[in-house]
Amino acid sequence: MTDIKFHADMNFNMLRCWGGGLAERPDFYHFCDVYGLMVWQEFWITGDVDGRGLPISNPDGPLDHALFLLCARDTVKLLRNHASLALWVGGNEQVPPIDINRALKNDLKLHPMFLSNQTTKNQGKYLSQDPSDPSRYLDGTRAYVQGSMWDGFADGKGDFTDGPYEIQHPESFFKNSFYKYGFNPEVGSVGVPVAATIRATMPPEGWSIPIFKKGIDGYIEEVPNPIWDYHKYIPYSKPGKVHDQIELYGHPKDLDDFCEKAQLINYVQYRALLEGWTSFMWTKFTGVLIWKTQNPWTGLRGQFYDHLQDQTAGFYGCRCAAEPIHVQLNLASYNIEVVNTTSDKLTDVAVEISVWDLDGASPYYKVTEKFVVPPKKVKQIMEMEYPKMKNAKPVYFLLLKLFRLSDKEALSRNFYWLHLPGKDYKLLEEYRQKTIPLEIGSGISVSGGTYKVRMSIKNKSKKSAAESTTSVSTMELEDRNGVHGISEETNCVVQKSGLWSKIHRNIDLARSGDKPRTLEVKGIDSGVAFFLHFSVHTSESSTGENYRDTRILPVHYSDNYFSLTPGEKMTADISFEAPEGSKPRVILRGWNYHLNHAVMM
């Protein structure tokens, strides 16, 4: 269930079961039914049955064709009643051998009543020709695609036109030249997990970060340690094409610094990938699948959660970009766009645009005129003007809010950190020293071993003059699960002064039924509370030489890896199952928040 809910939480609508694996467990399809995720189901044809590889694989597909077809037919019978099942696919990046492909095409032919693009008159004609009951077909209700790059996917001819699987400049995803075809069945990129996963799964020799070798052309080659290389590490640079994205934030000092900066890039990389695709929604692109969303092993390449089920920041970059109604910045044209993937017209809406600099000021603020977005369309709103202004700062934050004018309800919120052309993010290194005042509230509900925690975080910095005088404010965002998000609404709660200076700076929280409590974190600076993130741990201690992984996993967060501009408030719901006898605690950290306050339970 956790894997499926994670994908639903990312706002994905299709999962691909790759041909190199097996049909999943029955629970997999059941929960895809429950959460409304379509399944692309492949049969077991991939690169190990086509004469490739070392040692050379069997060039004629499976060794026993009759046994393969027997298993395929049993699999169809096992899965065909699941509403989530969308496609049967013959194989990964190739088609089955001729006899198997012919048999599958015949076994999985559509009943006439399920043929698309036919008029009612034609459907009647087909039914009169073949009046048989659909239940007499092996399936008859879903299309059979002979291979992942055939029949309308990639170039449709099997010419290895999927991918790429490496780091990209974020703006590249928005360019017409990035991908030629309508539906990319697999594309991927980087995916380093958090430092705790590296330490939990590798010996100390694997805790060393890559060596950064700078060439005469200025590009950096990342040389990973042998353990990372064995676990298929995808570098954050591509010499000759993409400058090192980690180095843009400053040279990493250690594993923690490297992995924290990697999360920044994971978020940006995958948000840009999906926003780039939706920018061309239905005008060029019809869909995209990401390889891969997770690793069942200790992998160091494309993943949104690791094999221990801890999410990377890419998880939340996808969640943001794939929301049904979405405001975004086209990183190639710098046009602000609104995406409406729903079947309803979006009316009486506007976009609030605010820029924040590293000194906590808002040098640019604007609210657009109201507009309408037709269903299943992308609307260009306006060009982002700030980068062309005379006194534009080299590094800045951009906050976009799409809201309904009638009641000021926020429909989408998107936060970017950006730099001017030719610049980098190294100024964010010293931004870590900023101390931003926060108000942290919390409440807990416990039932057996199930914990539900509601955290509220408010940036208490003073707003700029432009923000203070505007009548446009943002009410709470509500996602598909009814979980509240960012707001500027203030809740009155009682501050328990003096309590918060207890051991380990823990926030003392009562059990279910007690009143929520809040903590005031003092800060002398005004500005953005940047890249805040929660994690859940046991109360055990862990030191450098005696490291032990104290995380409780998996955990479901309504949002994570978020930033708050002055005056903004976020409410996040956190749920998890705690091991028997443990004393869970929720820890908050951030780019410029290092106090590690913990909610003890």
Image (cartoon, helix red, strand yellow):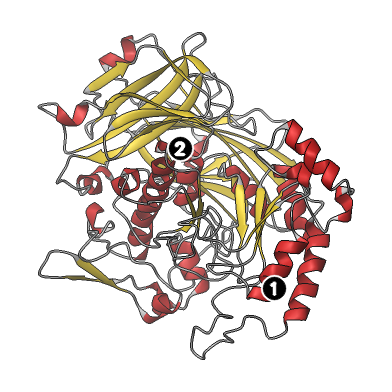
Dot label at residue 100? 1
Q: Is residue 216 visible?
A: yes
Q: Quadrant of residue 545?
A: bottom left
**Image point (50%, 39%), residue name:** 322
Q: Is residue 22 visible?
A: no
Q: Quadrant of residue 465?
A: top left
Relative image position of residue 466 (x, y in whole percent): 27, 14
Q: Which residue is mark 2?
A: 281
Amino acid at dot 1: Ile
Circle 1 SS class: helix
Horizontal relation, residue 76 to residue 476: left or right: right
Q: Between 144 and 532, which is closer to the camera in this rendering?
A: 144
Relative image position of residue 211 (x, y in whole percent): 26, 73
Give the mark, 2 or 1, whose residue is nearer the N terminus. Answer: 1
Horizontal relation, residue 394 to residue 497: left or right: left
Q: Residues within 10 Å of mark 1 (few under 14, many from 20)?
A: some
Whether 215 is drawn above or below 398: the answer is below
Count of numbered circles in the view: 2
Amino acid at dot 2: Met
Whether 497 is drawn above or below 208: the answer is above
Q: Residue furthest bottom?
A: 55
Q: Residues within 10 Å of mark 2 (few under 14, many from 20)?
A: some
Quadrant in the picture for the C terminus: top right
Q: Between 564 and 507, which is closer to the camera in this rendering?
A: 564
**Image point (72%, 58%), residue name:** 581
